[in-house]
Amino acid sequence: MSFVVAIDGPAGSGKGTVTKLVGEKLGFVTFDTGAMYRAVSYYVLKNSINLEDKNEINKMLEDIDIKLEFEDRVQILYLNTERLVKELRTKEVNEIVSQVSHIPEVRTAMVDFQRKLANGIDVILEGRDIGTNVFPNADVKIYLDASAEERANRRLKQNLENGIDNISYEDILENIKFRDNNDKASSIAPLKQAEDAIYIDSSNLSIEEVVQKIVDIIEQKRKQK
Ligand code: DC
């Protein structure tokens, strides 16, 4: 029997780091679903796809093949055999990913893909709509939040660690606020806490504290299952 954990929340709430660490502690496979929308956005930019043209979008979705591999438990995404890491976190991708992720055809394809990936395994998926839409019956649902300023700080640090040093704190903060509004206001899979999700504000918590909280919640739930 599989055990599904959904970790949702806004950009920079710490979901990525926390999900990876919780997965390591518990031996769960983890999936970063944002990376999938970023990969589609990368393809859109590279192939100058017209987002207003449904035929082009459908053709693109047929042509796209996403594969995930794990190196030291870190998810590496291959888009039609192209290995994408830094390419998923560029300014250009940041600027269009919210728009791309709100295209209904893109969402349907990604949600389908995510459900197939998680089928039958113990898994943690992190994203925006995992608990509300992808796995409404997930065993554990977490909604991880933090203030916009704290999230911008974290994203800046993460970028620098990944060798991206050409995006300022102000640009990141502006992009985070813009994406928050877009993600929350969307009529398609808006970013919102599932009713049965546990809310964690990580603004004043260390990564270890958040990880431990989530591990405790999962272990308690597993005992009951
Ligand atoms: O978590 P992230 O910043 O890598 O996500 C990139 C974008 O993808 C973000 O604008 C929201 C969108 N997204 C989504 O709509 N649904 C998901 N499950 C994950 C991400």
Image (cartoon, grey):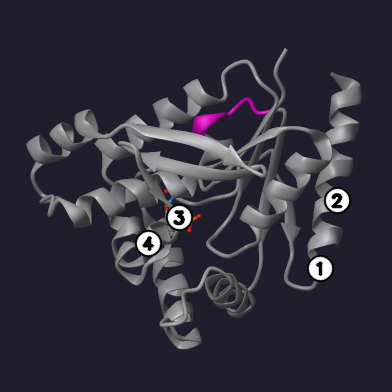
Badge 4 local density, few (<14 within 10 Å), some, or many (20+)? Answer: some
Q: Which mark is residue 182?
A: 4
Q: Amino acid at mark 1?
A: Leu
Q: Amino acid at mark 2?
A: Lys
Residue 44 falls left or right of residue 101: left
Give the percent coordinates (x, y) of residue 203. 73, 71
Q: In this figure, which residue is indicated by the disc labeled 1?
A: 205
Q: Is residue 205 magenta?
A: no
Q: Could you give the CA–CA distance between mark 1 and mark 3, rounded to whole angstroms?
A: 28 Å
Q: In this figure, which residue is indicated by the disc labeled 3?
A: 85
In contact (CB < 8 Å): disc 4 and disc 3: no
Badge 1 local density, few (<14 within 10 Å), some, or many (20+)? Answer: few
Q: Could you give the CA–CA distance between mark 2 and mark 4, rounded to whole angstroms?
A: 29 Å
Q: Which of the marked residues, 4 or 1, is nearer the chain's N terminus? A: 4
Q: Which of the marked residues, 2 or 4, is nearer the chain's N terminus? A: 4
In contact (CB < 8 Å): disc 2 and disc 4: no
In contact (CB < 8 Å): disc 1 and disc 2: yes
Ligand 1 closer than 8 Å to the CB at disc 4? yes
Report the magenta residues as a range: 133-138
Q: Nearer the viewer, mark 1 or mark 3?
A: 3
Which image quadrant is residue 166 in? bottom left
Residue 152 falls left or right of residue 122: left
Q: Nearer the viewer, mark 3 or mark 2?
A: 3
Give the percent coordinates (x, y) of residue 99. 28, 56
- Count of number-bearing discs: 4
Quadrant for the N terminus, please. Answer: top right
